[in-house]
Image (cartoon, rainbow, N blue to C red):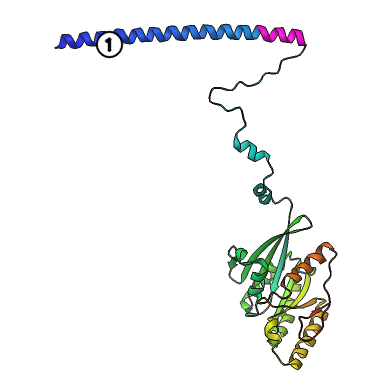
Amino acid sequence: MARSIREAIAKMTQLVCRKIVHINFRWSVLDRVSIIREFFRFIWDKILVCSVGRQRIRYRRLTRGESSSPPREAIEAALPTTSSYESTDEDLVRLKISLLGDCQIGKTSFMIKYVGDEQEEQSLEMTGVSLMDKTLMVQGARISCSLWDVGGDRNSLDHVPIACKDAVAILFMFDLTSRCTLNSVVGWYSEARKWNQTAIPILIGTKFDDFVRLPPDLQWTIITQARAYAKAMKATLFFSSATHNINVNKIFKFILAKLFNLPWKVERNLNIGEPIIDY
């Protein structure tokens, strides 16, 4: 039994040795052929150099399995795709706009109406401050408007400095159906001007759709007081309604026109029963 096993192992060893010798012989032949081929290629290159007078351009030879076309990643990196264009911030102009006013006057509804429901989902809320962004195209330039809504309670006054700093415009807002919120504008204005003297001031009365239901004499009283405040603040006065989208987009168009000297101007409107625009 042991003898038969030794004979089988010996036969297998002989077969393996023969295969190794055969493989080594094949590799030896291939190496020699490769050396001869490189030698003739070297001679051919020398002949070309002597005949043309300059070095021959050598191209990388593709190995088996490589494609002659460039990879897809290289093509996508070279093309100016829309996604790569939007991701760059080199051509993006950032504008900061602050919103100040008492609680429950409609500042959040005003912002949502402007930025849209989709952008609202990406909003950032902190203690005392809400942030929303909207990017738009203006004569080929990408404008990013960052809206800073400061909470209306007195505890939020600490956030006024950071909200107003570097702002290009400050919206002082009040509820047209609540005269006490209009009176509060004076305090918000004086606090904001401590931190920003150059921002465009705009006085905005919200909830115009409820305001028109008030008696005409009360409407006139509120209009007169609001116009007086706007004149003292050197601000433009707008009456607006987020529910019916009255003057919401027009206010931001007015801001952009003022900042970039665009040929657009709002029309003055002092008619009772219509959304007031005064400047």
Specify whether residue 195 is in view: no
Specify whether residue 39 is in view: yes
Specify the segment rendered in magenta: 43-52
Report the number of discs.
1
Which quarter of the picture shows residue 139?
Answer: bottom right
Q: On screen, 60 above or below 184?
A: above
Q: Residue at x 67, y 8 (%)?
A: 44
Q: Look at label 1 and name its amino acid.
A: Met
Residue 230 picture location, percent across and down = 80, 80
Q: Based on the picture, tell me whether residue 47 belongs to the magenta stretch.
A: yes
Foreground residue among 251 and 178:
251
Residue 91 picture location, percent across and down = 74, 52
Q: Based on the picture, tell me whether residue 260 belongs to the magenta stretch.
A: no
Q: How many other residues sit within 10 Å of disc 1, few (<14), some (14-19) or many (≥20)?
A: few
Q: Residue at x 73, y 70 (%)?
A: 249
Residue 271 picture location, percent across and down = 81, 84
Position of 42 with respect to 16 (left or right) is right
Label 1 sits on residue? 12
Residue 73 picture location, percent across and down = 60, 38
Q: On screen, 219 above or below 104?
A: below
Q: Residue at x 25, y 8 (%)?
A: 10
Q: Residue at x 14, y 12 (%)?
A: 1
Circle 1 SS class: helix
Foreground residue among 99 and 135:
135
| Secondary structure mostly seen in the magenta stretch | helix
Q: Quadrant of the C terminus?
A: bottom right
Q: On screen, 80 above or below 62?
A: below
Foreground residue among 2 and 117:
117
Q: On screen, 218 above or below 18?
A: below
Q: Residue furthest left?
A: 1
